[in-house]
Amino acid sequence: MSIKVSHVGHVTVMELNGKLMGGDETKEVRDEVEKQVKAGNTKFVFDLGNIKWMNSSGLGAIVSCHNVVKEAGGSLKLARVEQKIESLLVVTHLIKVFECHKTVESAINTF
């Protein structure tokens, strides 16, 4: 699991790569979001196009990040959600919680 953080204007883009299955990688994602929020960043796009698989722990980490950002008055959107991950969001009804976009650019443009 790796995270690439970039800033496009006032939006923090976090490109997640690999598997999001719990343990160190979920802690790494949460820690990075908390670090960015403390730095004053509150608009996030998670690029999930390179996530190979996510289990309930990974999903829980994204929900936790969503809550941290929301409490700071911000918003977290998902981009490039692969079919397997989208199915997980649908089954858990979290598809109603997260705004999903086909591209990172389209997600950024909604801010």
Image (tube, rainbow, N blue to C red):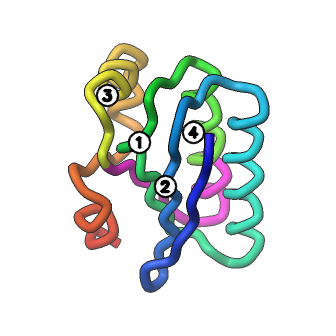
Q: What residue sits right under mark 3 in the picture?
A: 86
The residue located at (49%, 60%) in the rendering is 75
The magenta region covers: 67-79
The residue located at (60%, 53%) in the rendering is 3
Separation of marks 3 and 1 at Cα, in angstroms? 13 Å
x and y percent of residue 12 in the render?
52, 70
x and y percent of residue 9 in the render?
44, 85
Q: In the image as oriented, which residue stretches furthest toward the top?
A: 91
* Residue 12 vs residue 49, the one in the foreground: 49
Where 23 sits versus 4, above or below? Answer: above
Quarter of the figure with the C terminus = bottom left
Dot in front, 3 or 1: 1
Separation of marks 4 and 2 at Cα, in angstroms? 13 Å
Is 28 placed left or right of 81 in the picture? right
Mark closer to the chain start, 2 or 3: 2
Q: What residue sits right under mark 4 in the picture?
A: 62
Separation of marks 2 and 1 at Cα, in angstroms? 8 Å
* Residue 75 vs residue 60, the one in the foreground: 60
- The amino acid at mark 2 is Glu
Q: What residue sits right under mark 2 in the picture?
A: 15
Where 110 sits versus 26, above or below? Answer: below
Q: What residue sits right under mark 1 in the picture?
A: 50
The residue located at (68%, 78%) in the rendering is 40
- The amino acid at mark 3 is Glu
Mark closer to the chain start, 2 or 1: 2
Mark closer to the chain start, 3 or 4: 4
**Mark carried by residue 79:** none
x and y percent of residue 52 in the render?
44, 29
